[in-house]
Image (cartoon, coloured by chain):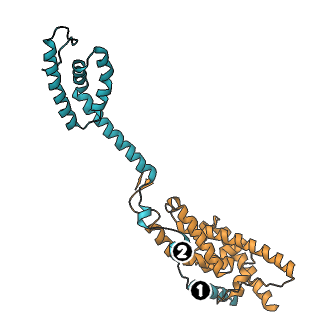
Chain colours: A orange, B cyan
Amino acid sequence: VRVLGVRWGGSPRGDGFERFYRAHYAPVVRLAYALAGSRPVAEELAQEAFVTAHARWSDVGDFDRPDLWVRRVVINRSISYRRREATERRVLEQLHDRHDDGVCVDGDRGDDELWAAMRELSPRQAEALALFYVEDQPISEVARILGLGEETVKTHLKRGRTALAAKLTSRAER
Amino acid sequence: MSEFDRRLHHAARELRERPVDVPPLAALGIDTSPRRTSQMPAVLAASVLVLGGLVVFATGRAHFDQSGRPAEIADVVAVAAPTPTAADRMRDPIVRRVATLSPHDEIVLVSATRQAAVAVSNDESRSPGAHVQRAPRWS
């Protein structure tokens, strides 16, 4: 209930936000992992996204789908991290003449080679693949989160799959 | 389904099933305790206090104005003061002091003063040269 611009009854930053956080934290961490490549970094990015959501909960909580909003935030942060990390890696390679295949090893099991190859795709292709496969979101939701048309998402998925398969084949042949 | 598609689906399912611990909100520096979140905003609380004060003040003023006491007090002062000039000088401060009293104290004080003024007036009206030209309005 809003009176004089103040929400009364229930706590806007209490139960509602906590339920939202508990329901979406884990899938958001997994999405960040697929895009950023490191479990600790993924957790950090997800937590930052939820802290941002909490700070703006008076607005975000009124959204039709705040879960889509927080995914958009974590995608943006993951892509920014990836760009930063790629730049740092290039600098380190130049400094130490070090070879790095881009695989982030942080103790996680699973197909790290596949996720590492996916992070070499264009950001849009990686985002579309992560949302569609990791999050298991339908095309319509992927389109809403990325702010794209459904046909455009389908194109990114198709090209992303093709490019990913080529990268994995190339890695296998090395 | 190609070998690549199977690998992609399997990797995605494996990632979805990977357990993720959900840290408490406090670990993120977020406090959602009811005490803090249901607290009335400070600005609104201050506004309520100011508005409440104004209502009490206005009610008190209305009570005082409707009581007709300033006129009565002016008459008492006119009788009790040694000269008309002194009465003019004393009247307003006394009226202001009486206005600060509670309604009960005000009634007691004015009643007692009225009786004293009537007694003084009666004495002076019998004395030639008394400076009081008019009798108190109460009777």
Asked whether the residues under the numbered discs 1 and 2 touch, taking CB atoms below 8 Å apart as contact, a structural biologist would say no
Judged left or right of residue A81, residue B102 is: left
Q: Secondary structure at mark 2?
A: helix
Dot label at residue B13: 1
Q: Quadrant of the N terminus of chain A?
A: bottom left
**Label 2 is placed on what type of residue?**
Ala
Above or below, comparing residue B101 to residue B83 in the picture: below
Label 1: chain letter: B
Query: Residue A83 location in percent, x, y?
Result: 75, 71
| Same-chain status of marks 1 and 2 | yes
Give the image quarter of residue A144: bottom right
Which of pointers 1 and 2 indicates the residue nearer the eye? 2
Cα distance in 3D space between marks 1 and 2: 29 Å
Identify the residue at horizontal 64%, vertical 80% (top origin): A40
Identify the residue at horizontal 20%, vertical 29% (top origin): B110
Q: Nearer the viewer, residue A52 or B2?
A: A52
Q: Nearer the viewer, residue B102 or A161?
A: B102
